[in-house]
Image (spheres, helix red, strand yellow):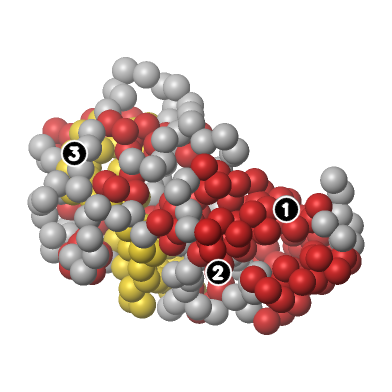
């Protein structure tokens, strides 16, 4: 069994060594760590070189170029570098708990290798010093984890740093998708739930570090307050998320979906193009919603009223 860990870095010198050390301490040890740097200007690249000398399982795949591809492009390049049976995505600033690899690989054994598979877990949200802010990111952010396509269309509960995919799913991310991906972890979750299996393990396997340089990060009270005092910005963000999720989902229509799933996706991506009565009918028929009641209320109200909607 060939296991690849894919780590994309960018100006990550502050926390990178701690994350690599946590990978090296895993109870499952038969892995290869592939690292691609996305154009760092700090000491990140030297840290990578030092670890390559320490551990023969660690490889710096682009030591001579500083091309910036962005998060999605960088991870896709890592995924395409060399084939494996399973691939784990790793961020540069988190810390993995010791049984992460072992736990997810054990879960994967229950599913056929010829069908797309994504296995993910819960996370503990921590501060810069790893002090625990929330014991469960899933419960505090989304109430519950998603494993079905209808759930994942409207709300992503998969965080890249705790996602593992098999080769069958990896082959379906071509990098030539017609519509932009909102995030690679969300898109891969959509494909897995549509064509194979999206599996959640209700156990944290990562300390998800929150700091000022997070690309996305967990939703904190401070972030929520910043939105609430600027409602015009908040509604713009809501609509951008809806539109971007629809655009991302359009890529599924190029895949061999069942008739039921094709109708589910088609009706979601075009819901804003039809009259009020049809929008209401689709919400009731297909059950498009968010995971929390209040979020569902906001989501469905916006869809029905088109409040602050711009074509």
Q: If the image is split into quadrants, where does the C terminus sit?
A: top right
Foreground residue among 82 and 130: 82
**Does residue 41 show up?**
no
View extreme (bottom): residue: 293
Instruction: Report which quarter residue 239 is drawn in.
Output: bottom right
Compare marks 3 and 1 and give the one earlier in the sequence. 3
Q: Which residue is mark 1?
A: 270
- Between tags 2 and 3, which lies in front? 2
Residue 183, position as x, y percentages in the image: 53, 48
Compare marks 2 and 3 and give the one earlier in the sequence. 3
Q: Secondary structure at mark 2?
A: helix
Cα distance between the residues tagged 1 and 2: 17 Å
The relative height of residue 141 versus residue 171 in the rendered view (above or below) is below
The relative height of residue 31 versus residue 129 in the rendered view (above or below) is above
Q: Secondary structure at mark 3?
A: strand
Residue at position x 20%, y 48% from top?
85
Q: Is residue 289 left or right of residue 255?
A: right
Cα distance between the residues tagged 3 and 1: 45 Å
Cα distance between the residues tagged 2 and 3: 37 Å
- Between tags 1 and 2, which lies in front? 1
Foreground residue among 17 and 141: 141
Q: Which residue is mark 2?
A: 151
Q: Which residue is mark 3?
A: 58
Residue 66, position as x, y percentages in the image: 41, 21
């Amino acid at each position: 069994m060939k296991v690849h860990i894919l780590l994309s870095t960018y100006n990550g010198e502050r926390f990178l060594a701690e994350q690599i050390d946590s990978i090296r301490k895993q109870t499952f040890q038969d892995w290869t760590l592939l690292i691609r740097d996305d154009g760092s200007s700090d000491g990140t690249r030297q840290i990578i070189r030092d670890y390559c000398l320490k551990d023969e399982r660690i490889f710096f795949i682009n030591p001579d170029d500083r091309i910036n591809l962005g998060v999605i492009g960088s991870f896709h390049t890592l995924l395409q570098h060399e084939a494996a049976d399973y691939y784990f995505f790793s961020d540069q600033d988190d810390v993995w708990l010791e049984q992460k690899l072992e736990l997810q690989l054990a879960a994967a054994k229950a599913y056929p290798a010829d069908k797309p598979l994504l296995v993910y877990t819960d996370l503990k949200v921590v501060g810069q010093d790893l002090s625990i802010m929330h014991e469960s990111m899933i419960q505090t952010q989304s109430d519950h984890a998603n494993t079905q396509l209808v759930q994942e269309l409207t709300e992503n509960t998969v965080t890249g740093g705790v996602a593992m995919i098999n080769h069958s799913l990896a082959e379906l991310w071509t990098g030539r998708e017609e519509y932009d991906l909102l995030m690679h972890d969300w898109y891969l979750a959509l494909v897995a739930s549509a064509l194979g299996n999206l599996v959640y393990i209700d156990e944290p396997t990562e300390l998800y570090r929150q700091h000022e340089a997070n690309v996305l990060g967990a939703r904190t009270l401070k972030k929520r307050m910043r939105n609430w005092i600027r409602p015009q910005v908040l509604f713009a963000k809501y609509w951008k998320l809806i539109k971007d999720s629809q655009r991302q989902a359009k890529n599924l229509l190029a895949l061999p979906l069942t008739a039921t799933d094709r109708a589910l996706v088609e009706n979601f991506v075009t819901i804003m193009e039809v009259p009020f009565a049809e929008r209401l009918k689709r919400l009731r028929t297909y059950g498009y919603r968010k995971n929390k009641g209040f979020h569902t209320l906001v989501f469905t109200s916006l869809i029905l009223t088109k409040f602050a909607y711009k074509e």
